[in-house]
Image (tube, grey):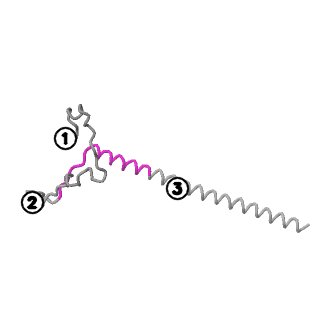
Amino acid sequence: MSNFPSLEEFDAGNHHKVINMHKAQFKAHDEIPSKTCLSDTQTKTENTDMEVLYVEEPTFLRKWRQQREIDIRKRDEQNQLKKNERIEAAKDAIESFYETYNKKKEAGIQKARHANTY
């Protein structure tokens, strides 16, 4: 029996269905099919020597992985070069700072000596 009213009921004005709000309108989950589990006999293969099935990677995926590895290596090399350049620049800056500092310090000492001698 359908939940929809028949044409006769609809024409007669009996198309309103009375619903009991305290009664469950839907059936329990018995109607929902459960997942079927395959038994061991269904999953066994004919060839028992074959333990693992290796599937060859698609060509486009293999090429993409190779290109990605090349790109990563290039990026790592560039980053290492930049890092080495920054380290050298920092060493040069420190060396320049101490040269300037020592020159100013020596000039200050000479000035103080010259001022004390007179």
Q: Which residue is mark 2?
A: 41
Tell us which disc is closer to us: 1 or 2.
1
Please indicate whether residue 115 sits to the left or right of residue 29 in the image: right
Q: Residue at x 76, y 64 (%)?
A: 105
User: Is 47 one of the magenta-colored residues?
Assistant: no
User: Is 58 one of the magenta-colored residues?
Assistant: yes
Compared to residue 83, the image places residue 63 above or below, namely above
Sooner in the amino-acid sequence: mark 1 or mark 2:
1
| Whole-percent x, y for residue 32 in the image | 21, 52
Q: CA distance from mark 3 to mark 1?
A: 79 Å
Return the residue nearer the eye: 115 or 33. Answer: 33
Sooner in the amino-acid sequence: mark 2 or mark 3:
2
Magenta residues span: 52-75
Report helix, strand or loop for mark 1: loop
Return the residue nearer the eye: 70 or 22. Answer: 22
Please indicate whether residue 56 sits to the left or right of residue 114 in the image: left
| Whole-percent x, y for residue 66 in the image | 33, 48
Q: Which residue is mark 3?
A: 84
Please indicate whether residue 4 sits to the left or right of residue 47 in the image: right
Return the residue nearer the eye: 105 or 16. Answer: 16
Q: Residue at x 22, y 37 (%)?
A: 5
Q: Amino acid at mark 2?
A: Thr
| Whole-percent x, y for residue 50 in the image | 13, 58
Q: Are there few (<14), some (14-19), or many (20+) residues within 10 Å of tag 2?
A: few
Q: Are there few (<14), some (14-19), or many (20+) residues within 10 Å of tag 1?
A: few
Rendered image: mark on residue 2: 1
